[in-house]
Image (spheres, rainbow, N blue to C red):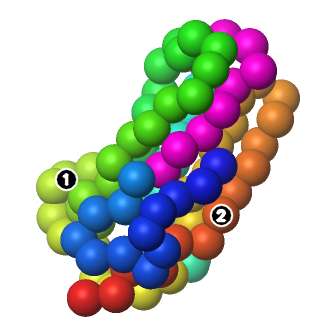
Amino acid sequence: VQNFPNPFNPTTTISYHLKESGTVELKIYNTLGKIIRTLVHAKRPAGSHEVVWDGRDDAGNPVPSGQYFVELQAGNAVSSRKLLLAK
């Protein structure tokens, strides 16, 4: 899982590649481990995918500047990356 730009304001594009089709969960967490936003929770085909995060939580509220984590879970594989929102 990758994102560009990082640091970002107001949006970042998160890209990921799947070797095979399957259920994907892509979530944003704060530094306390709380889920801030679920960007993807669906079956996706194999290949490259992109999702844009607009710096908002699941309720549509802007989140404060700071460090966040994006976590991709696809099948048994899990990967994560730090994101930095700079307002």
Residue 38 belongs to magenta span: no
Image quadrant assignment for residue 65: bottom left
Q: Which mark is residue 78?
A: none
- Which region shows up in magenta? 14-23
Select label 1 or label 2 by which is in front: 2
Tell me: 41 left or right of 57: right
Q: Does 49 appear above or below 31?
A: above
Question: Which sits earlier in the primary sequence, circle 1 or circle 2?
Answer: 1
Label 1, secondary structure: give it.
loop
Residue sitting at x 74%, y 13%: 20
Residue beneath label 1, please?
Answer: 59
Q: Is residue 1 visible?
A: yes
Q: Which mark is residue 81?
A: 2
> Residue 79: percent from the left, percent from the top?
74, 49
Q: Residues within 10 Å of mark 1 (few under 14, many from 20)?
A: few
Residue sitting at x 42%, y 86%: 66
